[in-house]
Amino acid sequence: MTDLLKNNGEICMNNKDMYIINDIVKVFEPIKTVLTQPNLTFSRLSYDTRKMHTGADSLFFALQGQQDGHRFVYEAYQKGVRNFIVSDLALNVENFQDANFIWVKNTLRALQSLVSLHRNSIQIPVIGITGSNGKTIVKEWLSQLLKGLKKVYQSPKSYNSQLGVALSLWDLTNDYDVALIEAGISTVDEMHYLEEMIRPSLGIFTSLGPAHREGFVSKEVKLAEKWNLFIRSKKIFVPSAQVLNEYLSNERIVSWGVSNTDILRVLAIHSYELYTQVHLSYRNYDFELSIPFIDKASIDNALTCVLVLLEIGVSIDIIRDRIALLKPLDMRLQLKMGKNNSSIIDDSYSNDLASLNIALDFLNQQNQYDKKKLILSDFEGEELTAKFLNKLHQVLSTVQLDEIILVGGRFKSMVFDFSRNIHVYESTEDLLSNLSQLNFKDSVVLIKGARKYKLETISRLLTEKSHETILQINLKSLEHNLKQYRSKIDSSVKMMAMVKAFSYGSGSYEVANILQFNNVDYLTVAFVDEGSELRRSGIKLPIMVLSPHESAIDDILEYNLEPEIYSVRILKVFVQYLKNKNINDYPVHIKLDTGMHRLGFMDNEIDELLLILKNQKEVRIKSVFSHLVGAGVESLKDFTAKQFLQFNSNADKINTALGYSFLKHICNTSGIVHHPEGHMDMVRLGIGLYGFDMNPKELTLEQVGVLKTTITQIKHIPKDETIGYDRKGLLTRDSIIATVKIGYADGYSRRFGNGVGEMEINGQLVQTVGNICMDMCMLDITDIEAKEGDEVIVFPDMALAAQNIGTIPYELLTGISSRVKRVYYYE
């Protein structure tokens, strides 16, 4: 290695075992303090009580984002926390007499200040990585390429935010040779906070995306802000094509590209079916590399890695061998339906303590089965020191695991000091040969391992098979959308999430688990059997049923569901049933019809409703609600205002007559954004949760589900031939036709036939040809490069696709057949 990865001066090793609260008070610039035990120590930073299992060694930060962390101080205290950083000066701490409290102006900045203090003790080289795209890929690939050459620490997954960077750096110690830290920003004046924590000695800039995005007024402003990460960096590695010319003259720049001024020059590129051959020149030495990708983004990211490796002294022969072995990274937890009534969480692309902790948190969120099991590989490139094994024990202790299956010869010599059902296998092959002896029935199984162990083979064997059409559902995007809508409501307003119709096609308990973990107040289903399924899957949130039927009242009570009462008839039936069971005060929700004219009590039925309610004790109103007809339609604004008035009038009448309060709610997804005056006590979030809102205004939503299939066969068909049933697909030229594995039985409407439907293959749009069949359809791929087995995105733009057949995204989402396999990701 060159001096770029050597340390200057004496290394001060600091393993960050413990900090004493009194020693670090000043770093927070406190407004006031209450230190009842100033000598208490901590080693962990906590901010989320849902992920906290023991708080005795934690410092809790009451962060104020979509939810106010001060609401969870008591819960943190109950879990053992005695050190708190808070900002609410009105917080009463009299009941926490053995705890330390430090009041600061901003709790997130206080956390960052503490991490900056910790960074002072880190003497190893830190490489900071930023850019618009490719940050995580470059970080992960560099970590792979350096394995065995250097002991590498990397920020877990895409922990690149203001909070994520802080949490990443807190676990960094001088036990490593080099650290790879990713930094991402969304607007101006953010990077200097990250730079103060990371202080990279070397910097990597990956790419500069389109202008006018992510809160930047121009490409120049975006680049300047991201460039602030490198203020103290000795060298900055960049693709020269991604940086404005005035930056390239900086003497710290080390670039690759096609220019004579680039340190690493690309002389020629030849793409083949499965790989790309690149002819390069590094400081006037010519050589060739084989990169196992053909897409431009992967080639660019690989060349950035090559440049960094060359500059830190890795030989060309080693680089050539290792680059050829790179594989695409699926850096997302995958939740799949397993065999024998099980769920499989596949996170088998890498393994370190930080990402293991994240994966175990996700495992802990799953409530569909009582048993939780872990298949864990050895930690590639990690010395199993006593200190490391102690940390591993602490991480594994955060989840009640019924069984732990360890893969790797080094595990055989370990002594485990906790009582678990533990199996140790020498290798993945050893586990495979004994897999039939293990029982994963009625379990959630986390498969976590380093890439070299190929635990994805275990995942494939444990997962239910289906045809190659899948709906990929990004649970992190669902969380993002929830936060977007929460930002539009007051903290006192409750959130009801709609999970009817199989969560708009996205799944039932998988989505409900995430919503429960994110503290929504209510779930809503359309029918009783949807609610009972969620209860059987461990969902404990209150669940409102929109269309309860008399025949399902037994299940309503058995599964503690709360029915919508929309008519006198259903009210009388339900009250009589409860009377026969001698049950009182059962929670119900009264639906008022204010103009939708679908379900609900009309104005002229309110008196009869009240007469029944006042003369019974069997039900108690939990909420009164109605539904807006056109919340996002400007021309219906007056009608919406009329609905508000009518609803409030009748709700107040019910309140006065009954003499007790209840929740009031009328705003749906569009109402949340367009009518803050109507938020009342609770709002109902539906299609917006899944990334679709006809008029989202200032929100930035992410599409949660992506429907994908594959090319089954490719044929060369001459001009004047026809494609498909009824010979509707007449070819006007010699054509290349691809058959893909999706048809109307999967939910791809016949209306998309004959060129109406568009799909995406390798980044290119292609049209359907001929009628849509039951299980397949055909695409004209004459003008693009494609091969059998290639991935096909069925709806590149779902809103546009819906518009093209005269419908809305709701229909496309809910119409995706249950036979289409759902695969869940958590990035």
Image: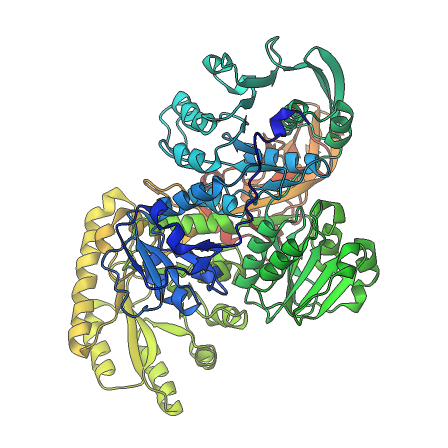
In depth, the one of 371 and 86 nearer the eye is 86
Report the number of discs: 0
Res. 78 visible in picture:
yes
Scheme by which the image is coloured: rainbow
Q: Quadrant of residue 157?
A: top right
Q: Residue at 67% across / 27% down in the picture?
A: 309
- Percent across and percent down for residue 811 are 47, 50
- Relative to residue 59, is residue 752 drawn left or right? right
- Percent across and percent down for residue 450 are 70, 48
- Percent across and percent down for residue 15 are 56, 49
| Residue located farthest toward the front when viewing the structure as drawn | 10
In depth, the one of 94 and 35 nearer the eye is 35
| Residue located farthest toward the top when viewing the structure as drawn | 260
In depth, the one of 390 and 766 nearer the eye is 390
Q: Quadrant of residue 270?
A: top right
Q: Residue at 69% across / 35% down in the picture?
A: 146
- Relative to residue 402, is residue 657 drawn left or right? left
- Relative to residue 532, is residue 632 drawn left or right? left
- Percent across and percent down for residue 22 are 38, 54
